[in-house]
Image: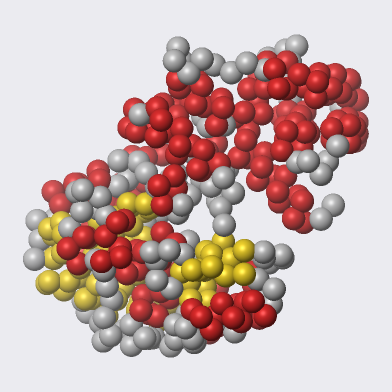
């Protein structure tokens, strides 16, 4: 079984698990909660192939599911699996879903495959039509965006180089330096253009964030939660590798990968540092910074199209804990900011608790900080990503980008 097929199958089941379970539950002779997790996953995998994978005949999907049950020592369940799936092969187009007017939450959750608590939350915030559009957009498999490394060439040169490798690269409208790849077969890191450091994989929405901090040559910049360094390397590139970027992360493995990325991209002025950005920065740094980026850990509800397992691995109880961590990170970053310096707080989620709520809490806690409107200093092309309150915001159903939020704080 090839790797791409397995990846497609696993991610597809995560993406559509709620809808698969709804359909299984309408046909099953017993409640799904009484079905063992192993058997339930076998059923989900088979039904996904029946509904969404034309290359797999229905009979093959059913037979494979039965054999999987037997191989796991679940011979008594094999008959249940066989009968349920064969029934669904005949009747899946006739299965009723909740009434959208009588029960809009259950309708949205079942048809778009989301937990009911999340559908209810977004329904309250966005309304029925926009929630449906957002849920649908988060279910679409995203394209692959890349960021041109302008230190090694112009977009046109990269487009030509990729064409020579059989990959079509199309400029992303309205985001300078962003390209979308089409026709890519295999892993992107096997492309010669990637290995030569001509580009970095990064969603178009994330690329906008770097421009909003507006880094300048000669500045000292602190990236407080660097991860694998997507935004840190972008900040360095935007200054022509003439700013000093200190890139913090608590995980050693990520910093090792960042060093490889720096070598590949040809960046010399980024310093990876292992540290906890939420505490003790006054002991780590004696100096202050001109700009600070806090790309904070969050619930990730803006990137569900890339990580559909996040639908089922999160709960509302996560939000207060994450918001407290985000507030601590921003306050620590603000301590290392020089007077007049700027701090960009960014998340890849769409909850108020982790976005506007954190900004309000930080402003109340630190009177030296003030909120700046991002549209006043943003490049003209980027202003369409700034909302009426001056916050950076992208949404999958509006911008065909991951869901990001950002706020700019300035130290008085």
**Towards the viewer: 373 or 357:** 373
Image spot of residue 121 (x, y percent): 38, 30
Residue at 57% in and 31% down: 113
**Towards the viewer: 358 or 100:** 100
Locate the C terminus by quadrant: bottom left
Residue at 34% in and 63% down: 209
| Image: 281 above or below 142 | below
**In terms of image quadrants, where is residue 140?**
top right
Give the side of residue 131 with respect to residue 66, left or right: left
Residue at 37% in and 44% down: 350
Q: Is residue 293 visible?
A: no
Q: How many marks?
A: 0
Image spot of residue 122 (x, y percent): 39, 32
| Image: 376 above or below 125 | below
Give the side of residue 385 with respect to residue 409, left or right: right
**In terms of image quadrants, where is residue 187?**
bottom right
Image spot of residue 245 (x, y percent): 35, 79
| Image: 262 above or below 187 | below
């Amino acid at each position: 079984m090839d790797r791409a097929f397995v990846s497609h199958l696993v991610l597809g089941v995560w993406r559509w698990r709620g809808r698969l379970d709804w359909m299984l539950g309408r046909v099953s002779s017993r409640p799904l909660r009484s079905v063992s997790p192993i058997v339930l996953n076998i059923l989900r995998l088979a039904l996904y192939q029946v509904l969404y994978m034309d290359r797999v005949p229905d009979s093959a999907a059913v037979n494979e599911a039965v054999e999987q049950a037997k191989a796991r020592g679940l011979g008594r369940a094999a008959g249940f699996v066989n009968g349920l799936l064969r029934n669904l092969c005949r009747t899946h187009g006739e299965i009723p879903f909740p009434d959208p007017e009588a029960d809009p939450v259950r309708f949205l959750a079942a048809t778009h495959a989301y937990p009911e608590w999340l559908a209810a939350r977004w329904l309250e915030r966005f309304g029925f039509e926009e929630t449906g559009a957002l849920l649908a957009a988060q279910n679409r498999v995203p394209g692959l965006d890349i960021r041109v490394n302008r230190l090694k060439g112009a977009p046109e040169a990269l487009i030509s180089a990729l064409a020579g490798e059989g990959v079509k690269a199309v400029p992303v409208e309205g985001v300078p330096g962003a390209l979308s790849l089409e026709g890519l077969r295999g892993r992107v890191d096997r492309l010669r253009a990637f290995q030569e450091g001509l580009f970095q994989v990064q969603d178009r929405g994330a690329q906008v964030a770097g421009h909003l901090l507006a880094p300048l040559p000669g500045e000292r910049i602190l990236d407080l939660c660097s991860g694998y360094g997507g935004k840190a390397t972008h900040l360095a590139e935007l200054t022509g590798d003439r700013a000093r970027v200190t890139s913090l992360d608590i995980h050693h493995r990520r910093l090792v990968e960042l060093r490889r990325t720096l070598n590949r991209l040809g960046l010399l002025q980024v310093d990876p540092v292992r540290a906890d950005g939420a505490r003790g920065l006054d002991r780590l740094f004696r100096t202050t910074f001109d700009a600070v980026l806090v790309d904070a850990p969050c619930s990730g509800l803006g990137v569900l199209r890339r990580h559909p397992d996040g639908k089922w691995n999160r709960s509302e109880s996560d939000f207060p804990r994450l918001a407290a961590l985000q507030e601590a990170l921003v306050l620590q970053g603000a301590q290392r900011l020089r007077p007049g310096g700027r701090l960009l707080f960014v998340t890849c989620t769409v909850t108020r608790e982790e976005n506007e709520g954190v900004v309000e809490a930080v402003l109340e806690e630190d009177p030296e900080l003030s909120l700046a409107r991002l549209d006043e200093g943003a490049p003209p092309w980027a202003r369409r990503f700034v909302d009426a309150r001056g916050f950076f915001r992208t949404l999958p159903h509006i911008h065909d980008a991951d869901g990001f939020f950002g706020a700019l704080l300035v130290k008085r």
